[in-house]
Each structure stands twice: as C-alpha cells, then as structure tokens.
C-alpha cells in the first residue's frame, strides 16, 4: 500500500492534491476517479448514527437523517462506569454504520466537563480525565472492532459553546496535559483511532486546527499517532497554516475555495509541496483503508431490535439513584399517579448535531399502556416553555390525591441545555418546581424522576422520598424507567460529575463563558476542586445508591514500597450484604500525602464494576503503574513521580472512602518548580474564593491573551456575528442573521422554541469566513468579501463586489471530481 500511495501522489496534479485535502460534500471525502481514489462517507454518531438523507447546507441543518438506534448519550453512558458495556455500545453503533454504508463515526466526544454550564456537556463523559479515558478507549475499540473508523473529538480544551469558533482556552501546560489531553493520549496509544477531530477554539491564542505544537509535536511525535486529523465542521481559519501544522482534511466542502489557497501557497513558495505530499500519504492511507472496509461491509444488516435492548441495558446501568428512603422499588399493586410532561415527551438525547432520529422510541406512558399498568396522568406543565400554569398544576396535584406513589417527572428541557449555547444557571424550569411543591401539599409519597444531561440544582431534596436521576435515556427510556422503579433492574449507576449545592460553589464559574476563557482553576476541576477547597457538595463524584448494600474489606497491596517502572497490584473484597442482586462500582483513588507542589487531594486511578448475587463476595484486583502516581513536570516536559508516601484509597465515591493503605515511592522528580510564593492561592483553596490573575500568569508562564472585541468597521473574516456592533449596515446584518436562522429550521413543526434558540445562538457564533466555507458553494468567497466591505463602512464598493461576483464563472467541485474520467476528457 505504501508504494501504491507514493505512485499515486507522483501522478496527482497540484490542484488534485489540494482537492483531496477537503471534502466533496458535507460528509464525503473527494475522489480522484482517474487514479482510482474513492470517496468515503462520515456521519455523526456519538450515541447513534445520524446519516443525513439530504445534502446538508445552511438551509437544512440537522433536518433529516435515516432512523437509527438512539443510545443514551455520553453523559448517561459514562454513569454506567462499565467499560464492557461501553465497548458493546460502540460495537452496536458500528454495526449500524455498516448497515448505512458509513466509514467513520464522528465520535466519541472526550472533552472534560470543566463547568456544568457547558451546553454540550451531555455529549461528553466526565469531569475526570481517567474515567473519560477508560470509557473512550472502550468506545473506540468497540467501534473499530467492526472495521468502522472513529473520530475522537474535540481536540482540545473545548469546554464552552459561547463564541466557540473564535474563543481561546487560556490554560497552563500542566492542566492541559493532566486534565484536557489525557483522554486523547490514552485513546491514541491504546485504541489507535482512525481520525482525531480538531476543535473550533484556539488554545492559548492559536487555533486548534493550526496548532503545530498540538497536532505535530504532541499528537504525532510524542504520542506516535498514525491516523489523520480532520477539522470540526467549519473549524478552519487559515487552511495553509493548517496544512503546515498537520491538519489533513478540512470538512465540510468549501467547494474548492480553500483548495485554491493551498495551490497558490505552493506556487508562491509559502507552502512546500513535499509538506503537502506528507499530509497526502496519511490521508490516502486512511481513504483506502476506509474504502476496503466499506467493501467488506457491503450488504451488512444491523440487528436494530437487539440494539434497542442494548440501549435499554445502558439506560438501566446509567441511571443513578440519588435518594431512597425505602419507597423504591415500588410495591406490587401500588396505585400510581404520574405527573410531568417529561413522562410523555421524554428527553432521549440532547439537541444539536448529534441528534438521532430514533428507530423505536418508547416513552414511560407508552410502556405503561403497552404492559397494561393502571395509572393516572396529568402533564402539569408545557414542555416548550417555563411559564407556570396554575390550572395545569392544580389539575396535576388533584390527580395525585390518595395515590400510594406519585412519580414526578422534572428536569432540564432542550431549551435549558443544547449545542450552540451554554447554560446561565443550574435551575430547572420554574414550572417543574411549582408542580412538585403543589403535589407535595396533597401527597408526600413523591418519587422524582430527574431528567437532564448535566447537574441541576436539587433544592427540593427534602420534598422527595426518592430521586432517580435518569439522565438522557436513549430510545428505550420508558422501558428502562419502569424496570428500575419496580425493581426488575437494580440501579447501579454512579455520577460521572459532581452535583454542587450551588453554582457559586464552582470556582470555574467565575472564568467560564468569556471569548478568551481563563482556566484559572488549573488542575482543580470537579471533585479535585471541591475536595481541595473542603466544600460540601449535593452529591459527590462517583456517588450512586442501590436497592442492596455492599461491604468492603481485606485491602492488600503487592508491595509497600515502589520504584519507577514497578507495578502495584491492589486487591480487596466486596460483598453483597443486602436482599437484592446488584452491582457496585468500586473506585480506587491515589493521594500524594506530602507533595511539595500544586496537587489534588486525591485522583481516580482505577475502578471496577462488580456484579454480585445476594450474599456473594468477590475479590477485586486493580493494577497501578507509573502513570498512576505521576504528574506532568512542565520544567522537564515529562511525566514524573515525586518521592514520598501515597495513600491507596478504596471507596464507593470520591467522598465515601472505606479502605486505606499507605505505600512509599522512590520517585524520579527533582526539578520541581516552587509556586508557593509566586502562586500561593493554589495552596490555599480552602481560604480563597478566586485565583488572582498574577498567580495564574505565574503558573501559565506568560501574560494571558486578552480578548479585544473588534471595533465598529474593523471586522475581519474571523469576526463572528455576535461580535458586530448594532450600527449602520451591521445592524441590518444582525437582523438578517436572526430572521434567516429561524428560516433554516425548515418546516413549521420543527420550529420549537428550543430549536429557535439553538439556531439563533449558533448563528451568532458564526464568523464571516464560515458564510462561504460552509455554504457548499452556494455563496462565494467574493460575495462574503463584499459583505465584509459593506459591514466595514465601504458600502458601495462591497455592494458592487457582490454584484460582480454574481457574474463570475461558477466552479463546481462536485461536477469536476464526480464526473467519470472518460467524460472529463470530452470536455
């Protein structure tokens, strides 16, 4: 294959080489038919296939796709803490990809949940890099075991939706390595994904798609990555700089506009053709591998019925029991009242590009009707708004009088969390709280079924006898809810992120959602911060109850002292001492007892999910290696271990430690930078509410990049619509953006309030460059050049440029490269 690729490259014209570096459509790579280079298809698929039925453009974004199994999204999948189940899920998604002739699944998303405010958190696994890495490795290996590729995203430090195409994540090197890159590193080294997807954002002022340090120095040279880097859809600012940095493929198609930039750069000597050829070697290897897989997978038929059952299993294991005074599982023949529109209109998934059309969705009410369970139902609120309806609430409360149990469905709706915008608070809709409080007045036997892809404020804790956090359930949510409530399945999920008592308890909140986001909290993300700051939380990381009880005992370590290169085997017993069969997630944390540097109190370094019958006992073994005790030493640019003592902690959550053993380690770290004087706040998180800029810059090693909103009439191609000042022509353009964003929603029934918000906020995040780069050739670069001139106050020059562009000869990349070679000769 290597020689074949070299021979092909030697026959490619410069224009063809450039054409290969971007798509032919929204989802397909560019073919060169005269040389036998095929086109391969990619599709969204973190929690199920979303292969679009029609060519996507600004007029039909997320409009239609082929039905597929809608599995629970990553937030719920992560709560299973079950590596084998995640592997099976990846494998099942790959089987449906084969069924739909898709070569690459665009997932998983392994960004860290830096703040619960990120609107896209439901697509990501956890606040913890170790848990994220373990599940990410399982997912990628599961998908690729079926000869289907993955695209691990979004590389890297992509933690907010606000100004996502121009924002900069200002993050120190140690936090970048230990928190935000760790999962990518482990997946690259242990699963070898076909592609890595570069993020929209900048990292320390450099666009991820143009970041040589990230894409070449770390990904390729340090980690030894063999696959390709594909841009997130619309993430490219400077295509030539992207090629230099190691970006192989720009998606979607810009209809050749960006290809011309590559051609001109080579002709002008700005880009060396040998560097372009180096990109093509890996890109063509990827294309031919995918094409070979597609040939093998032809006529494959997925078992959608079996996958529906698997989706239910994931929902069962990903549901977290947060509170239970014994009311659950429900007793047989209990009279039931169900209130809350979310029981009827369930949230199977989050909103945005990952939205799957479910093959077989089952709501809770539908399932009750199917199996003949008697119940009363009242919606209590409208799903599309936060307005409190006194009439609906009164009707709902009255329907619960005298019932043995009231199931209250409340939580986050699509309007409260989605791609394209971030959350402003942790509250659920006011109407949901009003419903709960009104029901509580007439019936205290309340079981809350809490819905959502992120933590929310649970200030109603005392009004519920049980709280079942179902997350986002996937298409089998109704069946799963019933099995868990009745005890046919025993809850075994554990939280993959901390539930704070209040949003202000999160230090990162102060620095979240700015165009240039300062990651001042450094490594102290999630439980790392709450533990170090000694702050109380509503529910800790790793927490989750069961209908049974477990007992931990007999902790042993294979050695009491370690040297670099040696492994430590930790073993302990876990016993089911309750009345139900169940599963427990046993968690292992490591604590550096006498560190002289900035260090978390403890960090997750191992876990096992153990299934036990009543009275059954098992021994669990977890192996730790050097990385289990390491930190990233920025001074030496390598992973090192401090000399000293480490506690091995075994628990059922980050705050429920049940067993402890201490070992010593002869570390190898010597050149440790002392930040006690230059950044003292990091050593006193119990006593400080914020990190001074000076401390952060000392940790960062430079002044932070400062965001400067473009002045009126000084806009560039990288200026996004939300940065425009409402003056002159820019005011008209902003009005046009608002109107057109609603038009793109398509049919009237799709124009929900949540989707209107998502599309409008998404439109405000779009830079001028994307108006042509993502238009599939419907809008030329010259047209946007003219629009930019008009917005910058040169109205007539811009207007005439737009008019002249209408008479230009239109280039059609599809027509050129999809036409059979014999017909091309006739032209």
Image (cartoon, helix red, strand yellow):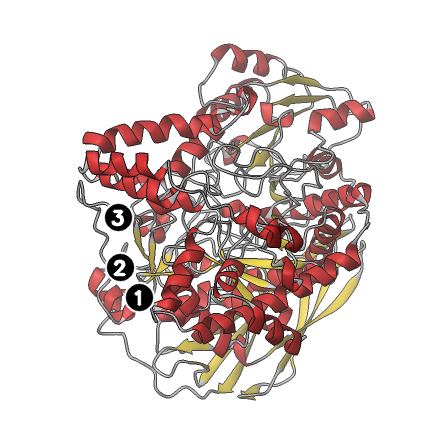
Q: Nearer the viewer, residue 605 or 551?
A: 605
Asked if residue 319 lies left or right of residue 516, the reply is right
Q: Position of residue 201 (x, y in %)?
A: 38, 55
Q: Position of residue 513 (x, y in %)?
A: 34, 47
Q: Are marks 3 and 2 in contact (CB under 8 Å)?
A: no
Q: Residues within 10 Å of mark 2 (few under 14, many from 20)?
A: many
**On residue 682, which mark appears?**
1
**On residue 487, which mark appears?**
none
- Compared with residue 349, is residue 675 higher up or lower down, i.e. above or below? below
Q: Residues within 10 Å of mark 1 (few under 14, many from 20)?
A: many
- Compared with residue 340, is residue 796 higher up or lower down, i.e. above or below? below
- Residue at the image point whose x is 52% and y is 49% from the top: 813
SS type, badge 1: helix
Q: Nearer the N terminus, badge 2 or badge 1? A: 1
Q: Which residue is mark 2?
A: 691
Asked if residue 760 lies left or right of residue 398, the reply is left
SS type, badge 3: loop
Q: In the rendered image, is residue 761 in sight?
A: yes
SS type, badge 2: loop
Q: Which residue is mark 3?
A: 716
- Compared with residue 763, is residue 584 higher up or lower down, i.e. above or below? below
Q: Position of residue 482 (x, y in %)?
A: 73, 34
Q: Determine the residue located farthest toward the front in the rendered image.
A: 826
Q: Are marks 1 and 3 in contact (CB under 8 Å)?
A: no
Q: Nearer the N terminus, badge 3 or badge 2? A: 2
Q: Are marks 2 and 1 in contact (CB under 8 Å)?
A: yes
Locate the N terminus by quadrant: bottom right
């Amino acid at each position: 294959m290597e020689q074949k690729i070299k021979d092909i490259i030697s026959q490619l014209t410069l224009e063809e080489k450039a054409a290969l570096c971007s798509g032919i459509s929204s989802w397909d790579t560019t073919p060169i038919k005269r040389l036998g280079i095929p086109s391969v298809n990619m599709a969204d698929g973190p929690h199920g296939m979303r292969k679009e039925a029609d060519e996507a453009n600004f007029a039909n974004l997320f409009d239609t796709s082929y039905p597929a199994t809608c599995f629970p999204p990553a937030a719920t999948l992560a709560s299973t803490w079950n590596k084998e189940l995640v592997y099976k899920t990846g494998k099942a998604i790959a089987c449906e990809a084969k069924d739909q002739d898709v070569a690459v699944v665009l997932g998983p998303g392994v960004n860290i949940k830096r703040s619960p405010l990120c609107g896209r958190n439901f697509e990501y696994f956890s606040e913890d890099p170790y848990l994220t890495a373990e599940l990410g490795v399982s997912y990628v290996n599961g998908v690729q075991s079926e000869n289907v590729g993955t695209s691990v995203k979004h590389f890297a430090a992509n933690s907010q939706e606000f100004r996502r195409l121009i924002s900069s994540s200002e993050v120190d090197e140690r936090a970048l390595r230990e928190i935000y890159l760790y999962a990518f590193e482990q997946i690259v080294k242990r699963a070898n994904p076909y592609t890595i997807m570069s993020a929209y954002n900048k990292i320390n002022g450099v666009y991820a798609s143009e970041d040589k340090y990230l894409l070449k120095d770390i990904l390729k040279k340090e980690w030894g990555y063999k696959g390709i880097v594909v841009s997130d859809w619309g993430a490219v600012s400077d295509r030539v700089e992207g090629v230099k940095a190691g970006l192989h493929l720009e998606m979607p198609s810009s209809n050749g506009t960006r290809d011309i930039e590559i051609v001109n750069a080579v002709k002008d000597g700005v880009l060396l053709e040998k560097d372009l050829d180096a990109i093509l070697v890996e890109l063509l290897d990827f294309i031919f591998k995918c094409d070979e897989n597609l040939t093998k997978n032809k006529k494959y038929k997925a078992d959608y019925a079996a996958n529906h059952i698997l989706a239910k299993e994931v929902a069962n294991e990903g549901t977290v029991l947060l509170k239970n005074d014994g009311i659950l599982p429900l007793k047989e023949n209990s009279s039931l009242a169900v209130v809350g529109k979310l029981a009827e209109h369930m949230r199977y998934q989050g909103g945005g590009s990952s939205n799957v059309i479910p093959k077989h969705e089952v709501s809770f009410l539908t399932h009750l009707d199917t199996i003949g369970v008697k119940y009363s139902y009242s919606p209590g609120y409208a799903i599309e708004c936060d307005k409190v309806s006194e009439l609906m609430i009164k009707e709902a409360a009255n329907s619960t009088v005298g019932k043995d149990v009231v199931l209250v469905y409340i939580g986050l709706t699509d309007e409260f969390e989605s791609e394209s915008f971030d959350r402003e608070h942790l509250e659920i809709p006011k109407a949901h709280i009003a419903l709960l409080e009104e029901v509580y007045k007439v019936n205290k036997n309340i079981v809350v079924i809490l819905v959502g892809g992120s933590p929310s404020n649970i200030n109603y804790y005392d009004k519920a006898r049980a709280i079942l956090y179902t997350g986002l359930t996937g298409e089998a949510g109704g069946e799963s809810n019933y099995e868990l409530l009745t005890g046919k399945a025993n809850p075994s999920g554990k939280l993959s992120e901390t539930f704070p008592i209040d949003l202000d308890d999160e230090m990162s909140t102060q620095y979240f959602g700015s165009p240039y986001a300062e990651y001042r909290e450094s490594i102290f993300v999630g439980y790392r911060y709450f533990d170090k700051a000694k702050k109380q939380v509503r529910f800790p990381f790793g927490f989750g109850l069961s209908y049974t009880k477990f007992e931990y005992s007999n902790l042993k370590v294979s050695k009491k002292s370690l040297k670099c290169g040696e492994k430590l085997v930790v073993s302990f017993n876990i016993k089911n001492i309750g009345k139900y069969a169940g599963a427990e997630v046993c968690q292992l944390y490591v604590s550096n007892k006498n560190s002289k540097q900035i260090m978390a109190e403890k960090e997750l370094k191992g876990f096992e999910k153990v299934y036990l019958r009543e009275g059954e006992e098992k021994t669990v073994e977890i192996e730790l290696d050097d990385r289990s005790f390491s930190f990233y030493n920025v001074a030496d640019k390598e992973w090192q271990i401090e000399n000293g003592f480490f506690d091995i902690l075994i628990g059922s959550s980050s705050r429920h430690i049940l067993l402890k053993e201490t070992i010593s380690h002869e570390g190898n770290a010597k050149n440790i930078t002392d930040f006690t004087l230059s950044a003292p706040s990091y050593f006193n998180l119990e006593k400080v509410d914020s990190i001074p800029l000076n401390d952060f810059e000392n940790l960062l090693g430079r002044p932070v990049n400062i965001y400067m909103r473009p002045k009126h009439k000084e806009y560039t191609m990288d200026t996004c619509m939300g940065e425009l000042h409402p003056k002159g022509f820019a005011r008209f353009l902003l009005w046009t953006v608002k109107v057109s964003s609603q038009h793109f929603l398509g049919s009237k029934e799709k124009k929900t309030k949540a989707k209107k918000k998502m599309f409008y906020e998404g439109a405000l995040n779009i830079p001028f460059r994307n108006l042509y780069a993502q238009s599939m050739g419907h809008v030329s670069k010259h047209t946007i050049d003219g629009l930019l001139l008009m917005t910058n106050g040169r109205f007539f020059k811009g207007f005439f440029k737009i008019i002249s562009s209408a008479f230009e000869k239109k280039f059609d990349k599809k027509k050129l490269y999809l036409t059979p070679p014999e017909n091309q000769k006739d032209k």
